[in-house]
Amino acid sequence: MSIFIPTTSIGLKLTSSSDRSPRPFREAARPNGFCGGLAFSSDEVLFVCVPGEGVFRVTTSGRQEIFATEASGVKVAEPNFQVFGGSALLYVTDSGAWKGNIGRLLRFDSNGVGTEITGGFGYANSLALSRDECCIFMAESDTRKIYRILLKDGPPVADRVEIYAETPGAVPDGLALDEEQSLYVTCYGSHALYRIDPARSVHLCAHDPNGMMLGGPTNLAFGGPDFDWIYVANLCRWTVTRTRLGRKGLPPVNLR
């Protein structure tokens, strides 16, 4: 199994193993700038959010190109995180400025044509798409809020956005869903991992007050042979932490 890790200037591939031996790295791509969220399309093409530049596409041969730079006629200034749905639709957060209330949720087709679904958020961060793709969850890092946004046409946009939950921990960052539709949230400012069950109760899964094993946790993803391990990137420690939850994650489109 391999893990792709975004860094300040290089996309790195981490080859995992079952023991504690050192993991070898190799460079997978070098976009021009800080690398944010990563997502694979159903045909294993890697997409990378690069703030200030746009969304990059990296083929399996390592060739990289700009995929998208604007949505609804507005430049994608701070692309942060992305997730693929069916029909090759790519959902992306454009974070905006901290407490600037200009964060956006965007959707792109396979040709890179983007539309704004909704906007006016604080720092729009990670996303998690529901199994039926009827709704998407989004973390707003500067308010501790997790939003649920309905994606199907029908109600006015204002009626499709609701506060799903609020985290006890500061700066919610990464999101991931398990097969039972529990939502996992990392809190960068509190070195913590929470689980929000389908009834919207919030449970503490892990907390590291010293910030050693969980040190400014950001993105997270499920993996492992049974897809019941969770991997967490720690921005303050430049490490990846994993733990076995015993709950299977919801597979992304390239693993379905």
Image (cartoon, rainbow, N blue to C red):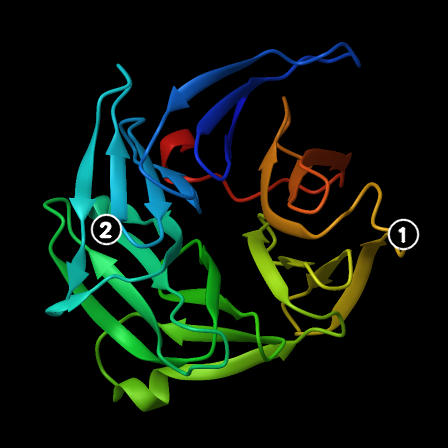
Q: In this rendering, would 149 be left or right of 69?
A: right
Residue 211, percent from left and from top? 83, 50
Residue at 63 percent of width and 67 percent of height: 198
Local SS, label 1: loop
Provide the residue designation for mark 2.
Answer: 89
Provide the residue designation for mark 1.
Answer: 210
Pointer 1: residues within 10 angstroms few (<14), some, or many (20+)?
few
Pointer 2: residues within 10 angstroms few (<14), some, or many (20+)?
some
Please tell me which residue lies in front, 114 or 147.
Answer: 114
Front of the two marks 1 and 2: 1
Residue at 63 percent of width and 21 percent of height: 225
Residue 151, placed above or below residue 42: below
Report whether residue 8 is seen: yes
Q: In this rendering, would 151 be left or right of 179?
A: left
Residue at 48 percent of width and 72 percent of height: 123
Amino acid type assigned to the residue bearing label 1 in the image = Asn
Q: Quadrant of residue 168?
A: bottom right
Residue 146, placed above or below residue 216: below
Residue 20, percent from left and from top? 80, 14
Quadrant of the drawing holding the N terminus: top right
Amino acid type assigned to the residue bearing label 2 in the image = Leu
Quadrant of the drawing holding the C terminus: top left
Residue 149, percent from left and from top? 40, 74
